[in-house]
Image (tube, grey):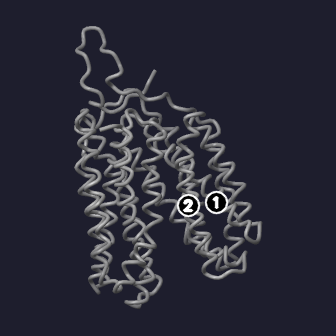
Amino acid sequence: MSKTKSIALLSAGHACVDVHQGAVAALVPFFVAERGYGYAAASGIVLAASALSSVAQPLFGALTDRWAMPWLLPVATLLAGAGIGLCGVSGSYTATLAFAALSGLGVAAYHPEAARVARLAAAGGGHRAMAWFSLGGNVGFALSPPLVWAVASLGGLRMSPLLALPALVGCALCLPALRAVRSAGGAAGPAAGGAGGDDVGSFVRLSLAVVCRSVVFVGLSAFVALFAQQRTGGGPAAGTAALFVLYLGGAAGTVLGGRLADRWDRVTVCRWSYLATAAAVAGIVTVPGPALYGFVALASMGLYVPFSLQVTLAQDFLPSRVGTASGVTLGLTVSVGGLAGPLVGGLADATSLRTALAPLALLPLLAWLLLRTLREPAAPRAAADIGPAPGQAAPGPPGAGRAATGP
């Protein structure tokens, strides 16, 4: 199977998994309407899924650093779907929390190993390939609200088992890609053993920049719909349009990031993206009327251009712990950034939504400062591309080990 086809299948499977990640929040209005949950109880369901998903990802990443676990992709996909599918069939709040947590566990188990397999399928970690893989997750997340609405409109929460169908599709899609990678020796090879030393300091600075990005994105995704209604004088449709633009810009930015990194290095692209994001968020806060939508699109693209690049950068800064690097950048930093959401809401209650969103323009500048002196790591090379040392046997088939850092 060609590299392009493998990445396409993995990207589509990623979309199927992240449909379930986004479905938790999309189900909240139906829990409130049908079961009479208060906002605190409803937010508890979201927290059960998102917190477990984000915090557990580095743990699964550490496991995949010790052992290659390609079987996690189909198993985790099914867990993510089963949890969401069962959320609506039980009237027990405790059971609903447990099923949401089960879905979050599946999401957590999927991402670190999927990022590793996508890197292997890209024959050493091509930027465009990782961008297309990440795009699948963006698309899946954006499709969650209309999918949940369509299923719930058929008969309410009792129809939630239908939401597990994307998991079956995702499981079927990832199996051919895994066979293709395994045939080259990559997925079944040892999970550790990349050449080159870990640059922990650079990894920490990159992770802090990702936290800044996460705070901005969580703040905008939570409140941009309400803010758009205020600034344009429109109704719910105006807010929905702003949220759609935010998601659509993210998908475009993910692909654009991979293309820009082919022309300039990843760190440079991330730096300029954060500067552009700071200006765009300032525009959202200050510009009234329909022009706000243009700044929402620019802010979204600026936040997502670095998204997949930061994953591959983290992997290159920790070449011996690629799974851990993926788990932290894809999971833990997102969770830490998400904790700032209630703070933004509390500030909005005390002052105004505009005042609460204004500080978000400063965080991309902080991310730029963190990356200002960061150096691009050496491009990784596949182990098979490194010739054998004198007196040693030739290396195994391509992809038999973890990608190694170049000289």
* Front in this rendered view, residue 323 or 179: 179
**Horizontal arrangement in the rendering, residue 185 relative to residue 4 (left or right):** left
- The image position of residue 29, as x and y in percent, is 45, 82
- Disc 1 from disc 2: Cα separation: 8 Å
**Picture quadrant where residue 165 is located:** bottom left
SS label for mark 1: helix
Alpha-carbon neighbours of circle 1 within 10 Å: few (<14), some, or many (≥20)? many
Which residue corresponds to the image point at 26% horizontal and 57% vertical from the top-left? 171
- The image position of residue 358, as x and y in percent, is 71, 65
Do the numbered discs 1 and 2 sit on residues whose CB atoms are within 8 Å?
yes
Measured along the vertical axis of the image, is residue 386 above or below residue 161? above
Label 2 is placed on what type of residue? Leu
Q: Which mark is residue 324?
A: none
**Horizontal arrangement in the rendering, residue 8 relative to residue 360 (left or right):** left
- The image position of residue 47, as x and y in percent, is 41, 71
Label 1 is placed on what type of residue? Ala
Provide the residue designation for mark 2: 248
Which residue corresponds to the image point at 55% horizontal and 35% vertical from the top-left? 262
Provide the residue designation for mark 1: 297
Measured along the vertical axis of the image, is residue 11 above or below residue 119? below
Measured along the vertical axis of the image, is residue 141 above or below residue 302? below
SS label for mark 2: helix
